[in-house]
Image (cartoon, rainbow, N blue to C red):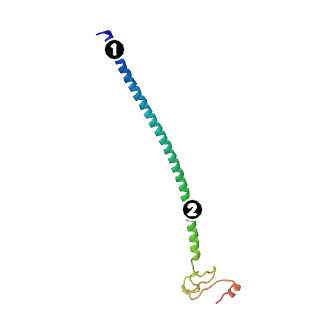
Amino acid sequence: MNIDSLKLQIAGAERTIQTGNDSATIGYKRTLISLDDQIEAAKLALEQAQKNFAAAKKNRDATAKQLGASVNSASTSLELARGNYDKLLIKAPIDGKVTKITVSIGQTINAGTPVGEMASDMPEMTVDTEADVALNLNA
């Protein structure tokens, strides 16, 4: 073998190595770029997820406040309705039977207006009172 021929083979081998190195360098750079892009995409996805989480939490808190206000309003309405219902109940001060109703359904009356008459199972009743009050009682 001749020295020139060996030099040519060495030069060819060096070109092949350089081409391989260039290809490896290009592949490495492409992989680096791809990984950088993936990192940026992951950062953006994380940022968006954090924004979505914060918005959901804010909406949850606002919804909880609205529901709390609705519960309070409903509770107040219930208390008012119970109070109004209690005002509509007619209660006798003694046990007995209703013998006469003196008002009609839907009629508006004032507090203390007699709405009927009752008969007690007790034949008579004794009331301790002042003399001047007793004079004003109807027998």
Q: Quadrant of the C terminus?
A: bottom right
Residue 24 location in percent, x, y?
A: 39, 26
Q: Dividing the picture into quarters, in which one does residue 105 lie?
A: bottom right
**Which disc, if any, is residue 139?**
none
Q: Residue furthest bottom?
A: 139
**In the rendered image, the vertical position of residue 4 relative to residue 45, given as above or below:** above
Disc 1 secondary structure class:
helix
Disc 2 secondary structure class:
helix
Residue 31 location in percent, x, y?
A: 41, 31
**Which disc, if any, is residue 8?**
1
**Which disc, if any, is residue 72?**
2
Residue 138 location in percent, x, y?
A: 65, 89
**In the rendered image, the vertical position of residue 123 relative to residue 110, given as above or below:** below
Q: Residue furthest right?
A: 132
**N-term mark: 2 or 1:** 1
Q: Amino acid at mark 1?
A: Leu
**In the rendered image, the vertical position of residue 10 relative to residue 123, given as above or below:** above
Query: Which of the two discs, 2 and 1, sits closer to the camera?
Result: 1
Q: Residue furthest left?
A: 1
Camera-nearest residue between 83 and 56:
56
Camera-nearest residue between 80 and 21:
21
* Image point (34%, 15%), residue name: 10
* Image point (53%, 53%), residue name: 59
Camera-nearest residue between 45 and 15:
15
* Image point (34%, 18%), residue name: 13
Q: Amino acid at mark 2?
A: Asn
Residue 51 location in percent, x, y?
A: 52, 46
**In the rendered image, the vertical position of residue 106 relative to residue 52, given as above or below:** below
Marks 2 and 1, how far apart at CA: 95 Å
Please say if the residues under marks 2 and 1 sit with CB atoms less than 8 Å apart.
no
Q: Dividing the picture into quarters, in which one does residue 135 lie?
A: bottom right
* Image point (32%, 9%), residue name: 3
